[in-house]
Amino acid sequence: MTAVLSGQAVRPGDRVFSGLSLAAGVLVLVVMAAIAVFLVWKAIPSLTTDSANFFTEQQWLPDRDPPVFGIAVLAFGTVLTSLIAMGIAVPIGFGVALFIAFYGNRRVSTALGFTVDLLAAVPSIIFGLWGLYYFMPRIVPFAEWLSTYLGWIPLFRNDLEIYTKSILMAGVVLAIMILPTVSAISREVFLQVPRAQTEAALALGATRWEMIRMSVFPFSRPGMVSAAMLGLGRALGETIAVALLLSAIFEINWAITEPGGNTFAANIALKWGEAADNGRSALIAAGLVLFLITLAVNMIARWIIARHEEYT
Amino acid sequence: MTTVPILTGRRLPRWSTPVVAAAAILVGLVLQFGGISPLGLAPALFAAIGFIVARSTWSWILEGRRHATDRLMGSLVVGALLLALVPLVWILITVAIRGYSVMNTEFITGTMRNIGPRVEGGGIGHAFVGTLQQVGIAALISLPIGIMTAIQLVEYGRGKTLSRWISFFVDVMTGVPSIVAGLFIYTAVILTFGFSQSGFAAGLALTILMIPVVVRSTEEMLRIVPNSLREGALALGIPKWRVITFVVLPTAISGIITGAMLAIARVAGETAPLLLTTFLAQDVNFNAFDGSQTALPTFIWDQISRGTAPAIDRAWGGAYALILFVLVLYAAARVIAAVFAPARE
Amino acid sequence: MSKRIDLVDLDIFYGDFLAVEQVTLTVNPRSVTAFIGPSGCGKSSVLRSINRMHELVPGAYVTGEVLLDNEDVYGVDVDPVLVRRTIGMVFQRPNPFPTMSIYDNVVAGLRLSKRRRRSKDLDDVVERSLRSANLWAEVKDRVDRPGAGLSGGQQQRLCIARAIAIEPEVLLMDEPCSALDPISTLAIEDLIHELKDTYTIVIVTHNMQQAARVSSTTAFFNVNAVGEPGRLIEIGETSQIFSNPRVKQTEDYVSGRFG
């Protein structure tokens, strides 16, 4: 009698195929680790030659002898532009998502969702080009208005009376660029709110807004935080549009309507061509800091979502 | 029998919204043509704010706080939506008008060889070759890796710790800034392994950006393949890898193609990583493995940085071509998704 | 409290689809009326049209009249928010707000109109409502704990407490026991018995024994085929519907020959 059920426990085809798919998955982890390793490795040469404090120095002269460079200005500009972008994009993005999830009828909402997503498809170089020649000139009056009426706040003071290429401008364009990220993710989160919850609120005699406050926001809060943070992650790393829209004056200037400011990403793009070996190594060091910041922001955002999913 | 009505509250009449809107527009027009800007606000903005304030106040007086809040928030939500659509429409129209005016055969097929910034003419032919080659390389590498990773996550590794880590880092990888991807390829491929700046290096940088997008979209498509299909095939005694390649993947293929095209559209517009990995050339370079190679985004960047009127015109032309390329991919992806979508509730 | 409901020539639509046709019936105050019938006969749609929850489905609308003590719920100046305050509802699955405590769940409806923090008045309302819902004894020591921590039957009684805390005239119940075990079901049925002295109650149920146990009036709905509108076949005293129905379809249904 021959055994009919025994053969190779795992077929060679299965072994090869599952091995390949596992290898592909592991490669993702390897690439993430490799990014960190290579950036650290190639940043070290410049960091050891830096005669200033890398975190607090406000100049960027890595190719001088002795090299003097630090990320204080970059950190300032990156954080400030991103905060302005968040301040504008987060409420508007939530508004768009609320409209699509609870206000519009289904056909209108689907079409609008697709249209807003289209904004994410516009390449950032085109945002830069449009921002430089069309948006910036049109928004100068807004910056003037801020400094005229709110100039008593140091943030909005403008002694130069030049209003272009400012941190504010870059922040506003960044806001437009991260808007689809914020609205797409929060839309998904809002659409997951169980109908039983929204109906419970309405059956108690809640208006639409009260329903949103009572049953949608408590349910969606973690997802909304993540949506905002993923938008922040995009804003922090955005390069080309910011490089075109900032004047790249290397100084910390709290007057956000005046020309000035620089960010990690824009600085790399702008200084790369003219940098010598140590200059490139210094830019890699700045890129490493940017990588670590966005990594932290994204990991926290994903972690919040993942923890929330386990709940529900 | 008559009863005191308890269900009717005082409501704003149906005509209240058009009337308040008309009044607001009228005020806006008066301000516009009178050249008055109260508080320095633009007439349109003033009219919009006026509309929201007036309608909410009226509602407060007539209907009370709760309905007034509801109407105020409703107006703000609609306002957010309109505000979000303004830049999109504005950009598309601007690119269409400015770009179309420089479009001609020479612009599409020509190159920038021997054409200075102050001279008109030249074209994007070389940049188009670069974009196709670089994006093609990125697609060739990232599609197999991305699809296999998704298969690992959905078909083999469900619930395993390693898969959870892979899944988490795929999400995190989505957030890697494009300039960092460029830096990584520069440090690893060019500095460490001694390759020259080339279209291939640019393609690798785009690969880093494309993989997580492909994984996520493929994963989603594989997850909606019904389990009964897999079980039915497995019950026939078909080995698992053949079930995946001959049953699961064909079922999900239209969704996977859609996702791939969206991923290509996304990376085709990237500029920053190309600046670090291949930089610019003014002529066609068909060899992606050696020497600089311009792509559409870097062409635009180059022309903007020259700053002369003919160069800026060329930048708009490049923007027109790039956005058309991206939108065609987008639209095609949507059409494929709509036409071949599996019947779903 | 408690009012009469009259449905007059009510047609219920989902977009172009006529789901329920020409329903005319009366629900008496301080009584329990049960809607029974096979799946898809539209009994839940009828229930949801009474407090205008039906129109929340995109494209859904009704024609005809729903009168609450002669006042048309669909009248021109009627505020749907006030309608839903006046006509409370309990759903098929218990749906307490998961992020709120038991206490906050009960007063959720009250907090909408009155901006008050926890006060003596609110404490009284919470106790009274939870007592009315036969839940007070079980939760009085943990009203600050999340409502989601309760058992299914307790959650459903919490939802009933939440509905009656705003003192509605009418209480609509959409298969309130279908997600519950037999013991919890019994507790809810006992509760319905007590509540009918105060409220007008309409209950939709799949379970004919339940209809027979809790209601004084029963309305039987039926649908001929999928795609056709549901109809009211017969309404009468519960004892009559179950023992001596006038229509053959009703007899077939209550005797278990279909459905």
Image: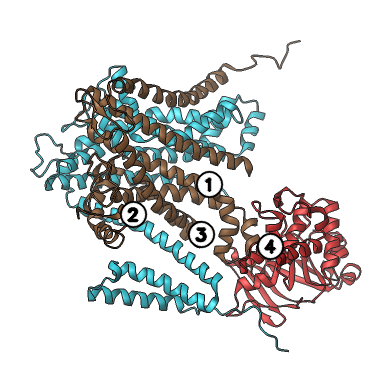
> Could you tell me if the residues under marks 2 and 3 are in contact, i.e. CB atoms within 8 Å?
no
Q: For mark 2, name the chain.
A: B
Q: Colour of chain A?
A: brown
Number of marks in the image? Answer: 4
Q: For mark 4, name the chain.
A: C
- As rendered, which of B291 and A50 lies closer to the eye? A50
Dot 1 amino acid type: Gly
Dot 3 amino acid type: Arg
Q: CA distance from mark 3 to mark 1?
A: 22 Å
The x and y percentages for residue C198 are: 81, 72
Q: CA distance from mark 2 to mark 3?
A: 22 Å
Position above or below: A74 against A65: below
- Residue positioned 20% across, 37% down in the render: B125
The x and y percentages for residue C125 are: 74, 65
Dot 2 amino acid type: Leu
Discs 3 and 1 lie in a common subunit: yes
Q: Which mark is residue A106?
A: 3
- As rendered, which of C72 and B45 lies closer to the eye? B45
Q: Mark 4 highlights which residue?
A: C107
Q: CA distance from mark 2 to mark 1?
A: 25 Å
Q: Callout 3: helix, strand or loop? A: helix
Q: Mark 1 highlights which residue?
A: A223
Q: Mark 2 highlights which residue?
A: B88
Q: Colour of chain C?
A: red
Dot 4 amino acid type: Val
In the rendered structure, which disc, 3 or 1, sits on the residue that comes first in sequence?
3
The mark lying in front, picked from 4 and 2, is: 4
Position above or below: B241 against C129: above
The mark lying in front, picked from 3 and 1, is: 1
